[in-house]
Image: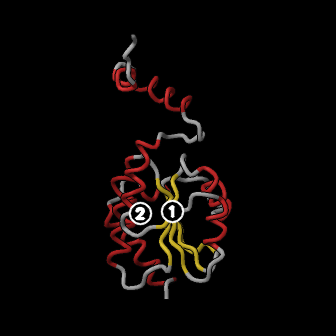
Amino acid sequence: MNTTTLHDIISCLPVYKLFIYFCVCNKKNNMYPEEIVIPMKEELTDNGFSELLTSADVETQLSKEGTTLVMINSVCGCSAGSARPGVLMAVANAKEKPDYITTSFAGFDVDAIKTLRQHLLPYPPSSPAIALFKNGQLVHFIERHQIEGRSAQIIAHNLIGAFAEHCN
């Protein structure tokens, strides 16, 4: 009887083979396995962010009156080190706040991100990224290159300024 477990398989695979294994076994065609993504999503959803999981979710949210913050989440280090902490800091400390705080995960919430990126044109795809919409129109956008190498405090300061200007 063969008692090989998934853990046995994973522990002996080099990282690149492990990535290929998850991609092949992934039935939802997501770029990343749930085991990696869920804790990163929960960092935002546990703090009041609503998830945009489908194209319809994006269209419904952006058709609402008021301001909507969208954090395009990512597995990259700058997302963990600056973007997520910065957006959480901004929402917690701003006097003026968006009416809605939302998130979608690049490489995982594939249909939602594809639709969201249509609303972000002419900006190229970027993740992580942070967008502020007012009545469905993009009014402020922070691209990945504006996140990389910057502290969470700088990201928060940028967002707090955008909230003060657009969330009233």
If you read the primary sequence from the N terminus, does the residue marked by circle 1 or circle 2 appear first?
Answer: 2
Q: Which residue is mark 2?
A: 45
Q: Quadrant of residue 95?
A: bottom left
Give whichever of 57, 114 is nearer the camera: 57
Which residue is drawn at the image coordinates 35% and 21% (left, top)? 8
The x and y percentages for residue 57 are 62, 64
Which quadrant of the figure contains the N terminus?
A: top left
User: Between marks 1 and 2, how big is the CA–CA gap?
Assistant: 7 Å
Quadrant for residue 52, please give it.
bottom right
* Above or below, comparing residue 85 to residue 8 in the picture: below
Name the residue located 42 percent from the left edge and 57 percent from the top edge. 147
Residue 167 location in percent, x, y? Answer: 49, 84
Q: At label 2, which amino acid type do we have?
A: Thr
Q: Which mark is residue 51?
A: 1
Residue 101 percent across, percent down from the top left: 47, 71
Picture layout, residue 141 above or below residue 40: below
Picture layout, residue 138 above or below residue 26: below
Asked if residue 12 lies left or right of residue 110, the reply is left
Question: Eyeballing the image, is 135 above or below 81?
Answer: below
95 left or right of 64?
left
Image point 41% across, 42% down: which residue?
A: 35
Depth check: 42 or 17 in front?
Answer: 42
Q: Do the residues bearing badges 1 and 2 touch, measured as CB atoms within 8 Å? A: yes
Q: Furthest residue to the front?
A: 1
Q: Residue at x 52, y 58 (%)?
A: 104
Residue 111, image x, y percentages: 64, 53
Does dot 1 land on a helix, a strand or a loop? Answer: strand
The amino acid beneath tag 1 is Glu
